[in-house]
Image: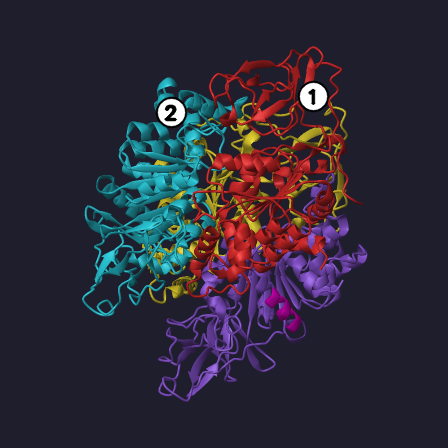
Chain colours: A cyan, B yellow, C purple, D red
Amino acid sequence: MNFQLPKYKQPNFDQEPFLSAPDARIVVIEIDGVAPEHYHALSIYPEYFKINGEWILASESRMDGVPVLKTDGTIQVVEFRNLRVGDKVIVGRTEDASEGIYIYAKGFSSNDTNSDLFAFRSGRSRETAYSMDYDKLYKLLIHERNNGYIVWVLGPAVVFDFDSRQALSALISNGYAHAILAGNAMATHDLEAALFGTALGQNTYNQQSPPNAHYHHLDLINKARQAGSLELLLEKETIREGVVYSAITNNVPMVLAGSIRDDGPLPPVIADVYQAQDEMRKHTRRATTIICLATQLHTIATGNMTPAYTRKDGEIRPVYIYCVDIAEFAVNKLKDRGSLEVTTLVTNVQDFLVHLKNNLVSP
Amino acid sequence: MNFQLPKYKQPNFDQEPFLSAPDARIVVIEIDGVAPEHYHALSIYPEYFKINGEWILASESRMDGVPVLKTDGTIQVVEFRNLRVGDKVIVGRTEDASEGIYIYAKGFSSNDTNSDLFAFRSGRSRETAYSMDYDKLYKLLIHERNNGYIVWVLGPAVVFDFDSRQALSALISNGYAHAILAGNAMATHDLEAALFGTALGQNTYNQQSPPNAHYHHLDLINKARQAGSLELLLEKETIREGVVYSAITNNVPMVLAGSIRDDGPLPPVIADVYQAQDEMRKHTRRATTIICLATQLHTIATGNMTPAYTRKDGEIRPVYIYCVDIAEFAVNKLKDRGSLEVTTLVTNVQDFLVHLKNNLVSP
Amino acid sequence: MNFQLPKYKQPNFDQEPFLSAPDARIVVIEIDGVAPEHYHALSIYPEYFKINGEWILASESRMDGVPVLKTDGTIQVVEFRNLRVGDKVIVGRTEDASEGIYIYAKGFSSNDTNSDLFAFRSGRSRETAYSMDYDKLYKLLIHERNNGYIVWVLGPAVVFDFDSRQALSALISNGYAHAILAGNAMATHDLEAALFGTALGQNTYNQQSPPNAHYHHLDLINKARQAGSLELLLEKETIREGVVYSAITNNVPMVLAGSIRDDGPLPPVIADVYQAQDEMRKHTRRATTIICLATQLHTIATGNMTPAYTRKDGEIRPVYIYCVDIAEFAVNKLKDRGSLEVTTLVTNVQDFLVHLKNNLVSP
Amino acid sequence: MNFQLPKYKQPNFDQEPFLSAPDARIVVIEIDGVAPEHYHALSIYPEYFKINGEWILASESRMDGVPVLKTDGTIQVVEFRNLRVGDKVIVGRTEDASEGIYIYAKGFSSNDTNSDLFAFRSGRSRETAYSMDYDKLYKLLIHERNNGYIVWVLGPAVVFDFDSRQALSALISNGYAHAILAGNAMATHDLEAALFGTALGQNTYNQQSPPNAHYHHLDLINKARQAGSLELLLEKETIREGVVYSAITNNVPMVLAGSIRDDGPLPPVIADVYQAQDEMRKHTRRATTIICLATQLHTIATGNMTPAYTRKDGEIRPVYIYCVDIAEFAVNKLKDRGSLEVTTLVTNVQDFLVHLKNNLVSP
């Protein structure tokens, strides 16, 4: 059986409490970047606001973002720092329509193929049986490859091992990635592996550390800075394999966000973290499935800006999030946000990636 | 390239310090179960003792065991509790031949295909590149299947998941196991899965907990106690798959050691832990490769009694130990014993088992 | 404010569904150690059984134990292995009185000072705020010292460090322990520290490993076996401090349960794990507070046999369980049993013990 | 005994191989931010470069930084991104003086009070005996309070708990902090606790989550943005306690570095991560002791830029780094950099902070 998207069921606004609910209250911004008292902050769920007697779904959501009514009648969700004087912000902190605000957490639940997961959420650990989760993910990715927007969120550990780096590259080359969110380290060590065979100085296959190999990542960064861009670096050094190579040659956009841990950095790394958030959100807005591997920083950053649903081809559909990490604490951090659609797997991402390649990419 | 066993190089006893070394000193036991002052305790390495001018290799080793000279001239390694009045114990705590005792840690090192691992031992973690380790293990197991003695040490988590339980059963049925060391829980939940589809009440595939499923493992144990043996249980309940079924039908001996955590227990579980040690040691004595999965208790117990070498067909060869667990702390516990031959993988045993099946068992 | 025990409120059996409920069904055992079909297994909560029209509270509880009606009219809870031919076992797997069986999970809830914990149970982690838990525990222990029965469940790590070993010894000497459940390793390394200053060969204060210190624990065990008992060992070696010393001199009983990991063992260690369970249960039956430190094996074994309530001086009162471990996975194992009364702290037991001593023992 | 700083012993350059070593080779930068081929990258140790026949110690160090010879004859250590056209970079990748470059790892070793730690470095875990480490740290901090520069590197978990937040505030108020490096979250939740009693919506003492408390951190950020600075926020909201309050009122500089996880952010948070690195390095340059608590991101970032030594009042002395985290993996990340002076403690930072306060701050 192929993957079936659950249908979204719109609330029936032709009944109470919706009919007699008041319009949502609106306050105009007076200081750039500062919300008014009692501003509303969004959840990850679809939220409807009553405007001139009509219930309008926010164009999207973003946890802790602020709803702003635009002149075209749409409701956009804006981060504090992006609020501007004159913006019309919806205020109110109820969710039951009594202030014209309605949070709708159960839009997919009747047909939700994942609804049975709910009872077990709190118990997922290294000892959870993952066979079904793998099988569902394989079907989901085959569906999303052509009908969705798959975003990968990658920590550097995905390129430390030979087989898993190959597996990830193959998945990208075979259409299973539409965008990549990562940092300086993932790209650096992937290119280091392409050029020197090492990641952070250690060979990705034989585990050996050649003499002066601790210079490899610095040399790679220096060469990239000299080349001026990753595209020029690939050309100049004739790099023909790896995650960065597969992404660039398959036109898969990469957002590389800077962090205070960075050496270098590589040319395309975004130094300003809030600008980086804006670039990341361009992809999480379109995302239908997100796969987060071995990075707390980027996973939580992505989770913060990803709603439980998205619009795709005019339809409202769930966003599926997978989070894979070897530590329960790390995956629970994301799960605690309360999304039904986060599936966590507690394992080594190396094995996870090889399983995906084995099941999705023909040899 | 197939797997090549490293050759053991005997020390050259025709030179100093061996020639002028004294005979090892021997003291006779006076109290059952109590060693004399300054008794020698063995390491995991080959140890030679000078007896009547001749260097004799202990018949085997067992960390912290005591060397006893037998009337047939062999040196057996005996646990404290098994020492008997009249036993001739070798005393001395040096290892450099100066007291007629020589510990030989480098017998395999010149040809040792693993010798390059040494430098990285302290650094193995979730981020170690495991591709080479997997490849070596596949080759090793193909070799050992017919030429060695493969012992599996199993925690209950190996049967909690559908795919990995199937994978392990297939490995056993295809000759990749010569003995199994485990506890009451592993066998109980495997048989629970065979009979009810659940492990500790949760379905191994769909993760659901049917009503009253927390009775399943108790009912299974009760049925087994009624049947009187696992063999009779399999017959009575027509169980035709799983780890226990595969082991029994393929004549793979299982030692099930009791613990204070046990419900029941199942009929063959050994209540006396020191008797259980004796039964386990019968297999570790013969073991050429040991694979420990997701159990600290049984892994450390097994590690304690397993030397770095064994005799097989008259030859001295290394014993390979693999330890797979999702926690660095757990695998380091075993590694800290100082054996060069322990290879640790930090991952979920579910994925590990499926990889092994994919690479070793034809579909 | 001092510690206040919550009051137990008996169910009102003078109303439905209790009045019209049938008597519980009873089946007589026909094979030693085997329960009848549909036997009832107990939970951790108070359970009432209707016998001859009267609702009788089981004399105690023990998760997964079987209720047996005795000739004196009491209901005892018996492990499978202890069932004997002729025992009258209550059968039925409902809990709502419809088969004469009633599980009563809310006996303490109205006055329960811990009831607010419930909402946060699933979220306890290294990041939980523990200040209140510490404060409550200090008050609780002051109350229990004279009015309760405090059982400590100890992994060997409690004696690896100088300050925490001193702290634990002081708590015992000052009346804060009524029984100790542990294994061979805890007692061995405590006595090793007393005699040699090391635990598993490493100095408990300066972290150094003297030459041949890996013999220390073996020598200690050997001396104890020679002495014949721990009491004689203390005398012979003039040991005057430590956990074992404090327990023995203050008449705090210790149950040392054997495991397959053991060296030796020490004289009082119980080789048969089911006999060890019986000895442990003698103390958990009386326990009013249990503190489990850094041992999964003994903690889960103890948790399995400890109910949520006990009778103390004719009153029914809660049993408080504390579980302290550095790994969320370990503490969650116990918490998953569903007891409201388990309080988990994710930290190093060294710091926990020093805090307790600082707050409970005057310098 | 009070704390004694180990003396630094300068290498004796009046002997070989120093005398006949050539001058270090210098290449001039041609592209901003790009190093020449074979540039030298620094370690954490003191490094000497032969310039015009004289061995000059780099003014400081910074792992992976590049040595630049200034016109005043000093050697400064510069990050790639800060290299400018015309800079004179030292090239060469040996460390034994053969290219005029000498790395001196043993300057403190003869008198090093920590030298005994070396043997145990690879084995530090939750089971390490920490009593001595605590005692040394207490003495060290008493010394450094008046004679050093103590830098705290703080994850948000330090303010989640009532007692530990109070303890940290007291340490700051009593002179035990000279600078704080942290992120948006630590400051936000500390101020949230001051204003609302909660951290991320949960009460820091009673663990309860009041209704709509998930708005608290957003409201706090919004108020701070409105106030325009943390100083004005403290005044406007009459906040009189906490980490931020103690830092500001005691003139302890705080560097708050931005990350992609941030909400808000608070006014003083630095959006550009490389500018944040520059600000952080101003303090690590002066640091004599660094204490890193419960943050991988900031700890590794700080570790990357901190050398093993510093100049203080004209003398060269060691920099002591402490790293406290509940996960071995986290503390090992920092330890793997190879510094003798990193002391790791595997525990909950809550308990660590309360211990420090108990031992350093009079009640």
Q: Quadrant of residue A255?
A: top left
Residue B322 visible in the displayed image: yes
A21 or A26: nearer the viewer: A26
Amino acid type for the residue under numbered disc 2: Ser
- Could you say whether the residue bearing mark 2 is in a helix, strand or loop? loop
Asked whether disc 2 touches disc 1, contact meaning CB atoms under 8 Å apart, the reply is: no
Which residue is more in the foreground, D153 or A152?
A: D153
Residue D299 lies left or right of residue B218; in this view the side is right
The image's mark for residue C236 is: none
Amino acid at circle 1: Asp
Image: magenta residue range: C135-143
**Residue at point 67%, 57% (across, down):** C354
Q: Chain of mark 1?
A: B
Please indicate whether residue A229 sits to the left or right of residue C120 in the image.
Answer: left
Give me the chain letter of mark 2: A
Image spot of residue B152 (x, y percent): 47, 44
The quarter holding residue C315 reads bottom right
Element class at badge 1: loop
Magenta stretch: helix, strand or loop mostly: helix
Q: Position of residue A219 (x, y in %)?
A: 48, 22
For disc 1, the marked residue is: B14
Front residue (pair B281, D306): D306
Q: Which mark is residue A229?
A: 2
